Image (cartoon, rainbow, N blue to C red):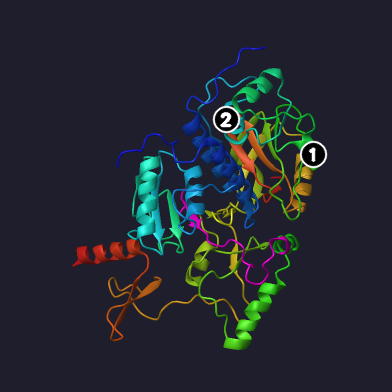
Amino acid sequence: MSELTPGFADPVLGAQSCFRAILEAMSRPGRLQRVAGIDQPPAPLGVAAAATMLTLADADTPVWTDAGRAAEDWLRFHAGCPLVASPAEAAFLLATGRMPALATLAQGSEEEPHRSATLIVEVRTLAETVGWKLTGPGIETEHRLQVAGLPADFLRQWAANRRGFPRGVDVVLTAGPWLAALPRTTRIEEA
Amino acid sequence: MTIETGYNFGYLDENTKRMIRRALLKAVAIPGHQVPFGSREMPLPYGWGTGGIQVTASVIGPQDRLKVIDQGADDTTNAVSIRRFFAKVAGVATTERTSGATIIQTRHRIPEVKLREGQILVYQVPMPEPLFRLEPRVSETRRMHALADYGLMHVRLYEDIARHGHIAISYNYPVMVGGRYLMSPSPIPAFDNPKMHRMPALQLFGAGREKRIYAVPPYTSVQSLDFEDHPFQPIRANAACALCGARDSYLDEVVTDDKGGRMFVCSDTDYCNTRQAAREAAE
């Protein structure tokens, strides 16, 4: 077994400030938030992805990840979350390689659309002010977001995800210490 | 005030906070949809803001500055005790100034001063289900929300017009959020409803007894239900505040004696005090 690195330096306040960053990201889609509090996230996770998992996942939330043995051990130890093999069964998914297709994840039902998956994707880079045009709830006129490292057909998948509203998957994009969120209500246009 | 030791930061344990935080994120992602959560027993009875307190406790951090209002007032029992509760269990700074607060927990009012980005408004909600007087079965109202079948509420408004000539709802006036979900704005006066529309601040709603959380993200459409020929009209007493002279704020009617004497004063005490201080400074 690999050497385990620590989780949040301060579990209570670390999770609180990370949650506020995610809440702010979810309520203002496309705006970048910086997360701190974990000194050595397990490879290949960045600080934001690791902190998001510790903030939201626990024994009640099945997690799927492709991040490999070290990250799995780290999540099992610090979050205590069950790891599942099938993406469809997971409440949270943490993708570092090719992300699972949105349509294969838990969508929630018409009556309980909140029982849907949240997908966290570690991407290469995130930048605001350039790239896609985002509109929808949380956005005054439009936000811009540029993402490198998503599958080529992501926008097509996202459009299908939006059509299913109120059902659908919510996405958190992370790159190192940065994160941005795409709730299912966000409309994305290519610039 | 000294911080109480022996409690976790913000009173709730971390498992509970995580559960509420997950519910909050889904609530923001589905504007106006009620997300069930495992409401905890709090050190005050249901009806005193247990839902709002649990939401605030899951969101608040040491950098925050908390304002709590009860019917617009900072100095009523409920507001004072909740403010002291968080000063005690989270050690956060508190304020009575709307513009200086990062989190505002409210019972039944929206402050008069325009809220801005970076602020969070937490509502205490007694009954989250807008349809409950029309359809008591939760299984049915859930299906009605799933189908966006809100005809029943329109019939209720229509019956008001048929009977009274106007829509006779002065508070808890139902709204449509994001053009999709019918939502109870909590018992705020209908006067406050327009403030919810495209508000720059994030609005979170917590109902402790009914165990529901819902949210309105910033800049989201919130429309009061109405008809083309009977448009929504916010109601306000036709008077000026007796203390600050405001003609644009929501007024409370205060009975001053047993001979029919009465006066109207601003319900938002911070707004009224600020205006009075500005007037005194100008004199």
Asked if the magenta segment contains residue B132, the reply would be yes
Report the span colored magenta.
Answer: B116-140
Q: Which amino acid type is marked by label 2?
A: Ala
Q: Which residue is denoted by mark 1 in the rendering?
A: A153
For residue A52, say whether it is visible: yes
**Direction from residue B110 to residue B23 in the image, left or right:** right
For marks 2 and 1, give the one nearer the viewer.
Answer: 2
Point out the image quarter for the N terminus of chain A: top right
Asked if the magenta segment contains residue B8, the reply would be no
* Distance between mark 2 and mark 1 Cα atoms: 28 Å
**Direction from residue B51 to residue A29 in the image, left or right:** right
Point out the image quarter for the C terminus of chain A: top right
Residue A73 on image: x %, y %: 66, 20
Name the one closer to the observer, B1 or A17. Answer: B1
- Count of marks, rendered view: 2
Q: Secondary structure at mark 1?
A: loop
Chain bearing tag 1 is: A
Please say if A137 is above or below B259.
Answer: above
Residue B56 on image: x %, y %: 48, 48
Q: Which mark is residue A51?
A: 2
Q: Earlier in the sequence, mark 2 or mark 1?
A: 2
